[in-house]
């Protein structure tokens, strides 16, 4: 990356609320002692995608290494592909820059399905969520190009959304992931003649997603979620899938930057390592939880985000109390019936 280009990646932390300590320092993640990675053709060949055992990357499915990029899927039906980094990442604060291109022959909404960027516990697990496994553990960021849900007038596609999962939630493909999304924004990214970028920034448990898709070399805000707890030691990857409709989903570069941010002693205590992903003030259901306790959006509202659902879920003790009470009622009824007999 050229110096001038590098400048545009930098952004005052205070504006993002991530740098109470007077601003952070970014450095390219290829430095010593850093688990960061990058492939950018002609610049970081040693870390490029390849078949040698020294490659930091694994390809999966229909993904192909081309001269200047990795093609996750070609513009053909029923393909899926992925690219995964081999090393778990133990950075506390990081920024992933994704240079991608989505293009194809399809007109209007006759193209799909989009691509996803992952920071997850598991890697190389093909599945239905943009080519990756469902019920993943970690963070997924989706560039969804096809509106599956019919009533989607209030939402213009392609649409970027994010989801944090502890392994208990399914991505609802038919509803474009709305029941579980943390937030999102429209991103017109198909068939553009200029470069398109996404950046996922994770600083002090603050998740920020921005995009540069207008050819103006400017970042636009997309998603901002505080209180996101992501364990260290997960894997970065990207994946894509096509169905009846298709597109070329190309990744030109993935660059991870370590972000060095000062923490106060109090923040050090607060930001202790976690073992499962979660979002503050949001209740992720446990796998074994009774169905009655799982939160589902009301049938009448299609635009309620999971964030809103989770905020409501702060009343979960009431749900438990109601459930226990109904069970007790049932037990008493059963007892009375058996006495009558
Ligand atoms: Ca979709």
Image (spheres, grey):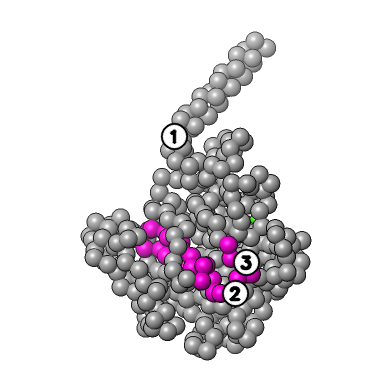
Q: Mark 3: which secondary structure? A: loop
Q: Is residue 4 above or below residue 317?
A: below
Q: Which mark is residue 190?
A: 3
Residue 171 visible in the displayed image:
no
Q: Quadrant of ligand 1?
A: bottom right
Which element carries disc 2, helix, strand or loop? loop
Q: Quadrant of the N terminus?
A: bottom left
Label 1, secondary structure: give it: helix
Q: Residues within 10 Å of mark 1 (few under 14, many from 20)?
A: few
Q: Which x, y percent locates residue 132?
A: 63, 63
The range drawn in magenta is 188-215
| Residue lying at 46% horizontally and 37% vertically, measured from the top left | 312
Marks counted in the figure total 3
- Quadrant for residue 256, please give it: bottom left
Residue pointed to by mark 2? 193
Answer whether residue 197 is magenta in the image: yes
Q: CA distance from mark 3 to mark 2?
A: 9 Å
Q: Nearer the viewer, mark 3 or mark 1?
A: 3
How far from the left and from the top, in percent, is residue 94? 40, 69
Q: Tell which of 251 and 333 is nearer to you.
A: 251
| Earlier-in-chain disc, 2 versus 1 | 2
Relative depth, front residue between 258 and 158:
158
Q: Residue at x 68, y 52 (%)?
A: 148
């Amino acid at each position: 990356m050229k110096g001038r280009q590098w400048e545009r990646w930098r952004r005052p932390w205070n504006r993002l609320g991530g740098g109470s300590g007077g601003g952070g320092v970014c450095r390219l993640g290829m430095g010593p002692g850093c688990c960061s990675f990058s492939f950018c053709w002609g610049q970081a060949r040693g870390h490029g995608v390849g078949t040698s055992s020294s490659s930091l990357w694994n390809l999966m499915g229909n993904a192909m290494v081309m001269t200047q990029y990795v093609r996750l899927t070609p513009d053909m039906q029923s393909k899926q592909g992925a690219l995964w980094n081999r090393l778990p990442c133990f950075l506390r604060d990081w920024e992933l820059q994704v240079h991608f291109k989505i293009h194809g022959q399809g007109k209007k909404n006759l193209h799909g399905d989009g691509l996803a960027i992952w920071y997850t516990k598991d890697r190389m697990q093909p599945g239905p969520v943009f080519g990756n496994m469902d019920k993943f553990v970690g963070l997924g960021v989706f560039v969804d190009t096809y509106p599956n849900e019919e009533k989607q007038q209030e939402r213009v596609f392609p649409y970027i959304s994010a989801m944090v999962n502890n392994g208990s939630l399914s991505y609802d493909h038919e509803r474009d992931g709305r029941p579980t999304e943390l937030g999102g924004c429209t991103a017109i990214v198909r068939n553009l003649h200029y470069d398109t970028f996404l950046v996922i920034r994770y600083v002090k448990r603050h998740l920020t997603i921005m995009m540069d898709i207008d050819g103006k070399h400017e970042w636009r805000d997309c998603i901002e979620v505080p209180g996101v707890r992501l364990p260290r030691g997960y894997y970065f990857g990207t994946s894509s899938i096509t169905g009846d409709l298709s597109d070329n989903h190309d990744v030109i570069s993935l660059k991870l930057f370590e972000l060095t941010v000062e923490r106060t002693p109090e923040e050090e205590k607060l930001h202790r390592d976690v073992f499962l992903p979660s979002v503050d003030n949001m209740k992720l259901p446990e796998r074994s939880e009774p169905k009655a306790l799982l939160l589902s959006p009301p049938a009448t509202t299609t635009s309620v985000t999971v964030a809103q659902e989770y905020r409501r879920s702060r009343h979960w003790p009431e749900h438990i109390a109601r459930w226990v009470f109904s069970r007790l009622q049932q037990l008493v009824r059963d007892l009375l019936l058996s006495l009558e007999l």
